[in-house]
Amino acid sequence: MRRSDFARSIMAAARDEIDKVWEKAKRVRDRRTMVEFEKACAALGKGIGAEALKKGLECIEQRRRSLRCSGCGRKMERSWQERTYSTLAGDVQLKRWYYYCRWCRRGTAPLDEWIEGEAGRLS
């Protein structure tokens, strides 16, 4: 993914989120609708942040090549699998590579290891 594609996809998501906030702003008439507007504004940052994180992680996965099995040293097979990650930016759903060794019957998803790490989550 090129930088311009990355920026374009995030800007499209930002425009959609801004439109939602704008619609809520037009309806502010009392305290209740003001609270809804305030919540929409707070969610705006998370929504755009989650989209940027998703696109960045997808970019990492697109560059990833083959892996060799740590048990037998053979090249592992791979397939795309969807996964939802909980992050500070909110839940991020994306496709990531899952590698599987059919000889050793071991599987791994490197992105899971990066994100979950020793603490169990990226955030």
Image (spheres, rainbow, N blue to C red):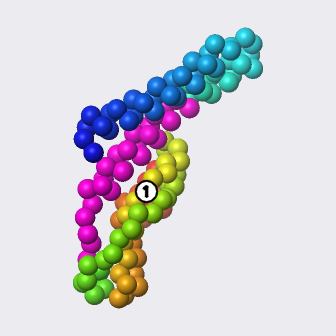
Measured as percent of width and height from the top left, residue 107 is found at 40, 76
Q: Is residue 105 toward the left or the right of residue 22 in the image?
A: left
Q: Amino acid at mark 1?
A: Lys
Relative to 2, residue 113 above or below: below
Q: Quadrant of residue 19?
A: top right
Residue 37 point in image, percent of width and height: 64, 21
* Nearer to us in this view, 119 or 41: 41
Task: Characterize the local packing of mark 1: few (<14), some (14-19) or many (20 or more) Cα atoms within 10 angstroms.
Answer: some
The answer to whether residue 58 is seen in the rendering is yes
Task: Return the x and y of residue 38 as percentages of the image width and height.
Answer: 62, 22
Left or right: 52 in relation to 44: left
Q: For numbered disc 1, what is the local secondary structure?
A: strand
**Looking at the magenta stretch, what is its main secondary structure?**
helix
**Is-magenta flag for residue 62?**
yes
Residue 48's place in the image compared with 114, above or below, is above
Q: Number of numbered discs present?
A: 1
- Decide if residue 113 is in sight here: no
Task: Check residue 104 for magenta coloring.
Answer: no
Residue at coordinates 49% horizontally, 48% vertically from top-left?
A: 92
Q: Is residue 17 left or right of residue 64?
A: right
Magenta range: 43-68
Give the residue at mark 1. Answer: 95
